[in-house]
Every structure is written in structure tokens, then in C-alpha cells.
Amino acid sequence: MARIDDGYDYLYKIVLVGDSGVGKSNLLTRFTKNEFNYDSRTTIGVEFATSIIKVEEKAIKAQIWDTAGQERYRAITKAYYRGAFGALILYDISKKATFESVERWLKELKENSDNDMVIMLVGNKSDLTNQRQVRTDEGKAFASAHGLNFIETSALDASNVNEAFTEILTEIYNQKRAKPVVGDKEQAPDVEKVQNIRITDPAKEHSKKKSCSC
Amino acid sequence: MEGTELGDSVGGGGAGSTDPPASYTPLGIFYSQDGVNLNDEEGELYLVEVYAHRNGIPSDLLAEAVWKVVWESKGRGRREEFHLEDIICARIEGNGLDLMEKGLVRVQSLWFSDPTARSMFVDKLKDVSTMFALDSERTTFAVESERSIRRVKRSLIEREFVGFPYDRSSAPPTSYLLRSFASLTAVARESILRATRGSLAPDTQTLPDNDGSNPDDIVPPNPILSSRKRGVSFNKETWLLFSKGEARFNSLCLRHAIFLGGLEPEARPLVWPYIAGVYDWDEIADGAGEDKEANLESEYISLKDSWEPKRQELDDRSRMGEDENTEDEFTQLKLDRSRILKDVPRTDREVSVYEDDASPALEALRNILTTYAAYDRKTGYCQGMSDILAPIVFVYGHEKEALSFWTFATLMKKLERNFRVDQSGIHRQLEELRLLTEQSDPELAEYFRSHDPNYYSCFRWILVQLKRELPFQDVLRLWEVLWLEHLGDNFQIYIVVGLLKLHRRNLLRLGGFDDLVRYINEMSMRIDIDGAIEDAIKLFNRVGPLSVPEGESEDQEVEGQPA
């Protein structure tokens, strides 16, 4: 298997969206650096991190784009969705309003991305059990109705964070693998090649669900 | 010409209206009083006053003699003699001539009883330096000495000046002058850099290439030019002399000195209200600041009173959405307040004054932002504003909440366009960025046209004036230069294009939009700000002021012709 220097077979772009303050940046740093910071700066525009995970002996590099949540900047931040294979829509289980915004985020993702993007709904801050305003089954029901994957996470106590990213990356990988790829799969992959082998299958099943562990 | 010789040949005492000011003590033909110290012993600034009195001496001899006293007499100042290359500004006032050093640390004041001698002295100065008028009255000049120019190849100077690409009659005269001056500064500096760092590309400074063949591996290198320094910083002692009216004062020279060298940290709390436009430069010597501060304080308190009594209701954590289309004003303010409470604890927490959760500086941020949201309902609060405010509160201290508020509010008159709901201000600036890139680097512009035609990759740079890209102290250095508007109100665009050009070789090898956004994000904290400011000045001189299609860009406040 030909590999380039930093050793990955596939590069997948994933975007994180959701209202301001739901914990997008911390979910990302928990996954990529195993860090959590109460005082992490608000995101302006977009920020990045990458992480490599193994799926069936293949190294998958996730390039994760963490976008700004405030509505005023969406006109610009939605430009960053282009070329993404997957998206996590986050809400804060202790703030009902952030869950109510999910529909708008979903609509925006669909309007601004390629149509076979894998989307996962993520109820974050599952550690705030006493302040919960969105029940797990509400999240699950919404996800199910819209064909999304679902998980509840806590960036603070790290629960389900790796699972969330592993699940979406695996699903993207399976989706890609299910279809014949253009060119030799032994080829060293890069961004362009990975993008070129994208397949479009509207009938893609998004039924795989995962319940939260809290 | 020997001073003693002249002294012997002349009797003391002036006549009539040509008498020097009473403070001068006559000493032969030169009435010189070494180091008339207007500050205390520890002070930095002092005037060295030289009085040239005519008594049958030909004007040219008089000019020559004064010249010798100014540049060649040892110990004329308290520490050492004046050097021509330290002079950044000259100001003519009647028969007087003030020569100002970098940072305005010292001012050499000359007074001629003979106006012809004064003119001849200025001519001599012009022979060994380049002088450009900073004002339409042609009384204030930027000075760049020949000694620092000398190292620059003649051809280079000709390209920058003689071959100036603009028709002078169509270019705004002020910009032309400032541009020309800036050009010289940059050229001179570049030549020095070149001499010290070996040969460089003649056009733009470039960073070393990355080896990575994969665009994903191309990362911004750490700055190699971090040793670049701008001029001498302007210090607090000097400022106090001006504000107490003890030093001769000219706002143009002050601003020029600050533009070239920046401010020392202790000077910032005093000077920022002027730079930001809260106080008028012309009021400095009247000591107007203190009276005005009392007024600002009471105005601020009444604005704060509009919401503070309702603090509990505002902070009530009942359900709130992100919907910006709510009609009700109080609901809107409540929404803004909830965002403020969410964002302030996430602002500059690594800076010592903001570290503690219970820090009074954090409380000042909350109060000021809420008061501003109530004061400017059209803009309200949105993310990025706490980034703009935090350096201001840091500079003034949390006790000066009112002054911080008014500094913020005054700046927001210009920056508010960044935060409008329709984002029109951001789009306009990204458009300016596109125009300037096209004018200054067609190849790079072509790259952007294919991969990021809207320049969204630079969104964050523009929105918060590079706040997220620089260490906190560097943010202060950059912002005071931007807020001065010495080279127009969109100098930031020149900084941004200068940075893109610095990294152009790497940028041109990137794969596309995603790589570009990533690369530009990764430039954060790898920017040499003094170098970036110099590059921007250089770019300004080469390209000239941006002509924005809407034609609403404001011109500078000064006008003049080349000297």
C-alpha cells in the first residue's frame, strides 16, 4: 500500500455546525488533543484540526472544520461546507433553543453541500444531567425522522467523543467503499483524489443509529 | 567658519521685533542655551534651543554657523549631539524652525532673526535629506536623511520616485506626498535589511519554501524577520510635556512620530483616546482631557442606567434562541446580553488581567458591551466585539470603564460596518482586498480568482483586525497604527495584502480553497508585525491609495505638495 509521509490512506473533510456555545470547539479539541478548556475562544470564521483513525486497517485522516456559530456570520461560514464528506450538527442538551435551531442548520447544510454528505446529530454536554432540557428520545426522534445518525456526547468528561467521530468516519468510509472507486485504490491518496472518487447515491441509507451512553 | 570668530565679530543684543523670546540667553552671535530641560532630570524630552542673531553678518554665513552648531557641536544636548538621520520631522513657524527626533525624544528649536538665513538653513537640510510636506500650508515636513538613503541604489530610488506610476495631478496630493515619503522610508529600510541579511528578491520579501510536495504539508514558516524594528517608540514623558503645554506642539508631527515608531506601553493609556478619536488632537495642550473625562463619565453612567436596573431580568435564563429577527427591543437586548455573558469568559483569558473568573476587568467587559448594545441597538452585540474591547480595557485599566466605553464606541463608528447584520462592511473590505491584490500582484490575484474569489479565507483577519493572528502586545502595536489613519482609513487592507505577498510562493503552490483556508489559519501567531507594517507602507507607496468604486473612501486630513 502506497502511503505518503504522514501516513494516511484517505482524507475526509468534516464540518462542525451548531449554535454558538454548544461546545463545537471543545468537542474538537477533546477528540484531537484530548483537551477541554472552559475559556476556549469563540470561533471566528473557521478553525481546523486533524486526527487519524484506523478503520479496517486503513488510516483515515479526518480534517475537521470547526465553524462559527453566530447567525450573523453564516453567509460566510457556509462557504466552508464545500467538499465536506460529513457534518456533525451539535446542540446543547441543557439549552432547548439550540436544539430548536437544528432544523435550520440541517437545511443550511443541505443547501450548501453535496447531497450525499453523512450527517450526525450530536447532543453535547450530556454531563449536565441536572440541567437537561432536551430528552435523549427527542434527539433520537428528530434524527430518525431526518435520516441522521445520532449520539449524545460530553466534551467535558469525554464520553462518546471518540465514538462520535469514529462512527461518522467509518460510515463515510463504508459509503465510499460501497461504490467502485475511480482509479487504483493503491494510489497514494490526496485531497483531490479523494474528492474525485466521491460518489453520489441519494438512496444512501442513514439508518444506523446509536444511542447515548448517559 | 569658527564659532568663536563669529562671536568675536558681533556685539550682543538684538533689535526690535527680531528679538528672540525672553528665555534665550545671548552668547555672542549664537545665543545658545544647552539643553534647556523642560522636564525634570529623569525626563527624556528636552528642547535644545539655538538662537541665531544677525548683526551685519551675511545670511549665508549665519546659516552655515547655525548648521555647525546644530550638527557638529558636541554636548549640545544633555547626552550627545544631534544626528541628522534621527530627524523625522521639521516644522517652520515664522522665523523659528523645530527639528524633531524619532519618537520626539528631543526637539531642536532654532530661532533666526534673519528670515533669509532660516530659508538657507532649510535649503541645506533639503540638500542632505528628502523632505515632504505633510500639510497644505507647507509648514510641517517629514524628513528622511540622505545618510540612510545613500545605501540605496540610485535606480531603486528612481523607480520609486521618478518613475512614479501615477499622474500627480489626478492623485490626491496628500496621499502622493505621504506615499512618497513612505516609499523612501521603506526603500531605505529594505536596503539596510538587504545589507544585513544578504541578497533578497528585489520585489517582495519572501519566506523560505516548504519542501512538502503535498499541498496539505505546506505550512507557514515562522517569521524570519522578527528582528525587524520600527522607529523609536513614543514615550509617556514626552507625551506629558505636550499635554502640559511645556513643549511646542504640532499634532501632525506627533502622529507622524507615533506612526513611525508606535507607543511605549505606559504612553498608551494617555494617547489612545486621541488615536481612537475620543479626544481631539488639537486639545492636547489645553489639558482638555481631564475635563472631558468627567463629562464622558457622567454620560456613560446615564447610558449604563438604561439597562443596569433591569440586570436581573436581563440575566434571567429563560429560553432564548439564536433568532436575530425578534422585534421586541428588550428581548433583543436580552439576547445580546446572553451572548455577552457567554463570550466574555472566553475572551483573552491568558492575559493576566482577565485570568481570574472574578476579575473586575471581565466585569468591565460585560458592562461596556451591554451598555454598547443598548446604546447602538442597530448593531447590538455580536461575536468579535469582545475581541475588540479587551485590549482597550487592558490598556486603560478596568477602573476607567467610561473611557473604555467611549473609546470602543468611537472605534465602532468605523468598525461597526464589520458587524452589520447584512455583512456589507465585511464584503466591502473583502472587495477592497481583491482590488488591491489585483493591482499589486496579478499572479496571486489569479490564484484567488480560481480558488477563493471572495477572499473568504481572509475573513477573520478583516473582521477583528488581525486580533486572532497576533500575540496580545503585537495587537496593540498594530491597532494604534491602524487607528491613527495616517495613510488612510483602509491601511489594514495593505497589511493583509502585504502578508499574502510575503507568503505568495507557498500560497501559489496550494491545492485549492481548503488548503488556502488552512494555510491562512495556520499563519496565526507566525506573523512579524513590525515587518508587516513596513511591508504595508511599502505597498502603499507603490500602489497608491485604493480607489474604491463606490467612491466613498475618505481622503486624509492633510494636503500638500512635494518639497
Image: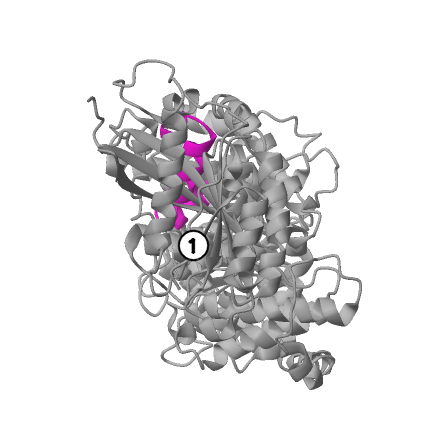
* Residue B48 spot, x, y in % from top left: 44, 67
List the residue tagged with mark 1: A211
Residue B368 visible in rendering: yes
Q: Is residue B224 magenta?
A: no
Callout 1: chain: A
Residue, x 51% and y 31% (percent of image)?
A116
**Magenta region: which residues?**
B506-535
> What secondary structure characterizes most of the magenta part?
helix
- Horizontally, is B1 left or right of B337 in the view? left
Residue, x 56% and y 37% (percent of image)?
A79
* Residue B52 spot, x, y in % from top left: 51, 61
Q: Is residue B534 magenta?
A: yes
Which of the two residues, B493 or B389, is positioned nearer the viewer here?
A: B389
Residue B204 visible in rendering: no
Q: Quadrant of the N terminus of chain A?
A: top left
Residue, x 38% and y 49% (percent of image)?
A164
Relative to B60, is B270 above or below? below
Relative to B90, is B562 above or below? above
* Residue A96 spot, x, y in % from top left: 59, 64
Q: Residue furthest top?
A: A183
Give the amino acid at mark 1: Ser
Local packing at callout 1 (Cα closer than 10 Å; few below 14, some 14-19, many 20+) is few
Q: Residue furthest right?
A: B327
